[in-house]
Amino acid sequence: MTKLIVRRVFWTIPVLLLVILLTFVMMRQISGNPFRRSERAIPAEIQANLEAQYGLDDPWYIQYLRYVKGVATFDLGPSLVLRNQTVNDIVRDHFPKSLELGALAFLFAIVFGIPLGVIAALKANSWLDYFTMFFSNVGFAVPSFLVATLLIYFFSLEWDLGFPTSGWSTWQSKVLPVIALGLGPMAYFARLVRGTMLETLQADYIRTARAKGLRWRRVVGVHVLRNSLIPVVTAAGPLLGFLITGSFVIEQIFAIPGIGRYYVTAVTARDYSVVMGLTVLLSVIIIFANLVVDILYGFLDPRTRDVRT
Amino acid sequence: MSTSAREHEVLAPRPTIEPGASGDAGAPIQQTNLWKDAWYRYIRNRGAFVAGVVFGMLVLYCFIYPLLSPYDPDKVDFSLSNQSPSLEHLLGTDRFGRDLLTRTALGGQISIGIGFAATLVILLVGVTYGSISGFVGGHLDNGMMRFLDALYGLPYLPFAIITLAIFGTVNFWTMVIALSIATWFTTARIVRGQIITLKENDYVRAAKALGARWYRVLARHLLPNTLGVLIIAIFLELPGVILGEAFLSFIGLGISPPDASWGAMASDGRVVYRTYPYQIIIPSVAIATLVMCANFIADGLRDAFDPRTRET
């Protein structure tokens, strides 16, 4: 197991280098130079000075290595548009809000999604099951911008329940964005848990557990649940990507000053060092989440330990 | 040489399902094949069948209704702006007075078109990558899969946005590329897995033993047997791509007015959601319907092609 962890941890280094390289190469393909805007003619000397200042006149691999070094030392470089801000400043200002939003939405999805799936599986083919599954199928398909808009329309405007339509400060302002972002993952969890539980319920060891006279509640609690929740851990990785994608939209709608909203602003302002920095940041988060998931999976399901050598 | 090729063609068994296993007792045993069988299993699945019908109707509406509609989807008439749904305008009009029933169909053409085109690109790249990896095997397979592992789970939206920035313009095809650039990994994995499993089958060994060249084995025995998986993959990928288009257009980085797509229309409707909520609800419901149907179709197809996975 230790060997697996060490191996897996070291494996993230080439992965990080590769992902940064790909992002770097892609960003370089974007035509135009931030200092060569059509609106503002800059004398050639100043242009050259600026490029030298930001190291843009070096060959690409030097720039890449410098960038990797920057990432390794948690320095994502300067913003090209906001001259007095670094990408680090922007991350420090915006990331905590996105992190909180994502974490709360994830928590919401787990707290409501897993019980829904469990109930649906235990009462399989009852009206409760059908209702839950219909609900989660709809929840999984409805785009989050409609959910967000409807929540605002009813909860903050029509019924005036005291939830603000935008912002991210009081707990009331966090309720609607969290639900809007978490509904899709919640539906996903409910479906996933129901599916794996139905499968587990038919396993031989469940029959054995029942046959030896174990109380049903204990069978479900100890044997069924534990084995059904393993896929939930595996799903957490892709789900993080889902949350990030969703946060772009949700932060826009609720005017939450987070990473997703700032990303769109930076793209529109062609602040490419910020775009690059944020893309790398999001990728690094996902890579580390995958690392944690893989290691957890190794603990939860001993069979995977041998395979993944 | 030619005789051996003919021989292995004859020897290679066609994929068949044992007949009579689920048929009525006493009925004459009919010749059946994988496709026919899958089709019967599919239409017997009520949810998947209904989803397929609704999906088909939605697509037909999008592509046929604009031809029949009495309204010009691009004609601006401010005397008709923001009319709620009525008998003349079943889905109402937008703030430029354009008939939303017509415009939703037009937006659907773009959304569905981008969805299918991007799915096709995803499949093409995925099949190429996956079949090379699975077929060649060895170190190449290992390396190619490690590469996929590295990219697995990366958020597709930032990369789609960067891709659009590289192109510098947003149109149908740049959207297609942007939406497929970071989404083909799963398909590649599925195809590779399928090829690896198939490679060990006796009929493939037989074909090889009879002297079939590698491209013949690949083209005649391996790839045709991934078709079932690929058809499922279409409907697995489609929802993500459709939602991706909607998200991109909604945050203003995708399709933008005067062109219509469901995401762009929702973005328009969002501006007036307080007074005219139907303007964001209509395109969103269209998206949700399509996505939900695709999910059901994918589930139904999976059960139809592989009865072992059928849920109780």
Image (cartoon, coloured by chain):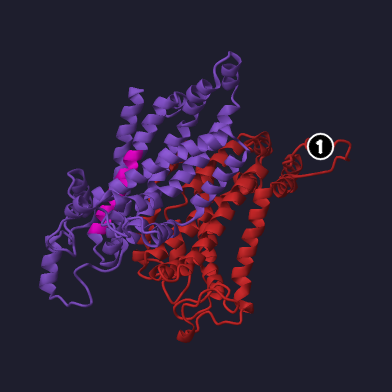
Q: Is residue B68 magenta?
A: no
In the foreground, B274 or B302: B274
In the foreground, A66 or B156: B156
Residue A242 in picture, x, y percent from top left: 41, 49
Q: Quadrant of residue A260?
A: bottom left
Residue labelled with disc 1: B20
Q: Chain of mark 1?
A: B
Q: Which residues are magenta?
A: A274-289
Q: Amino acid at mark 1?
A: Gly
Q: Residues within 10 Å of mark 1 (few under 14, many from 20)?
A: some
Is residue B40 in view from this perspective? yes
Residue A93 in picture, x, y percent from top left: 20, 53
Answer left or right for B294 relative to A147: right
Is residue A20 in view from this perspective? no
Q: Main secondary structure of the magenta part?
A: helix
- Residue B306 higher or lower than A227, as above or below: below
Q: Is residue A281 magenta?
A: yes
Which image quarter holds the C terminus of chain B? top right
Instruction: From the image, state the color of chain B.
Output: red
Secondary structure found at label 1: loop
